[in-house]
Structures are given as C-alpha cells and as structure tokens.
Amino acid sequence: MTENQKPQSRLDPSLADPRSLATMVDASLKRGSSLSIALSDAALGVSLDKLGDWTITVGISSRSDRFRRLTSSLERLGFFQATENEGSIYMLWTSLLSEVGDVRTTAEQTLLRALTVLQAPSVSPYIS
C-alpha cells in the first residue's frame, strides 16, 4: 500500500452489506464476549452475554462537531444516554428493551444502522 492509498473499511456505508456484518459478528462474537470498533470521533462496542442478550454501546466525544446530530440519530434508533465520562457521552441499546422479532436479527440491523449513522459524513453548516 502506498502512502497515498487509503485503506478501505469493510464497514464503509457504501459497501455495507448486512451479510458481511453478520459474517463479522459470527466470526468475532460468541456468547459471553464482545467486539469493539473505533471510528474517528466515536467508539462502538457490541456484547452478547451468556444469556443471549445483546448490548450495543456508542461513545461519542462531546467535542465532536457532529455530537447533536449523532445523539439524536441514535435516539431515533432506540439508543438512550447511559452515562457521561471525561468528555464523552455513552449511548446504549439493549435487546432486553426490544420486543421486535428475532433478537439477533434486530441487534444486527440496529448495529448496521448505528454504523451507518456514525460513518455518515459531516454536513457543512456553511452555504457557499
């Protein structure tokens, strides 16, 4: 890879495919384990506890220029503010509060939507 080439993320929204996300989750996440994904201004964690309950956590820097947009978008997906620590807010989604269909499918869809929100580019507040 040359210095000018940018590594391609397999989670890029334009390439996001629910099947590849399911493959990544299947390969990385077993009962009693977790998976973390670091993004430029957020961190995402997924855990599957021993009882089969899913939890998705998103940490967002309160200094991010996308802070308000990200938190409101995540709230629309069913996330809620869990805590705040050292300049970051942590949003939480859990399958325990979800009563829609298959738990795993719902968790994977929520994860994909959250990643799409987090990877969406910033919109410039200026009109040119």
Image: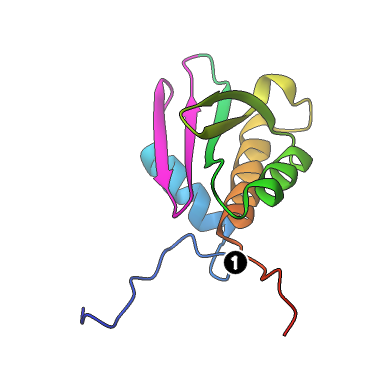
Q: Position of residue 45 (x, y in %)?
A: 47, 35
Q: Dot 1 corresponds to which residue?
A: 121
- Amino acid beneath label 1: Pro
**Closer-to-camera residue (86/26):** 86
Span colored in magenta: 30-50
| 34 drawn magenta | yes
Which residue is at 66% across, 28% downward?
A: 81
Determine whether 121 is above or below 40 in the image.
below
Please tell me in which quadrant of the rendered image residue 26 appears: top left
Question: Tag 1: Cα neighbours inside 10 Å, few (<14), some, or many (≥20)?
Answer: few
Determine whether 68 is above or below 121 in the image.
above
Q: Quadrant of the C terminus?
A: bottom right
Q: How is the image coloured?
A: rainbow
Which residue is at 70% across, 51% downward?
A: 69
Q: Is residue 81 visible?
A: yes
Which residue is at 75% across, 79% downward?
A: 127
Q: Residue furthest left?
A: 2
Q: Residue furthest top?
A: 51
Total numbered badges shown on the rendered structure: 1
**Closer-to-camera residue (30/70):** 70
**Closer-to-camera residue (84/78):** 84
Q: Quadrant of the N terminus?
A: bottom left
Query: Secondary structure under badge 1?
Result: loop
Which residue is at 41% across, 30% downward?
A: 34
The secondary structure making up most of the magenta span is: strand
The answer to whether 3 appears left or right of 44 in the picture is left
Q: Position of residue 122 (x, y in %)?
A: 62, 65
| 33 drawn magenta | yes
The answer to whether 3 appears left or right of 117 in the picture is left
Please tell me in which quadrant of the rendered image residue 53 appears: top right
Q: Position of residue 79 (x, y in %)?
A: 69, 33
Determine whether 5 is above or below 28 in the image.
below
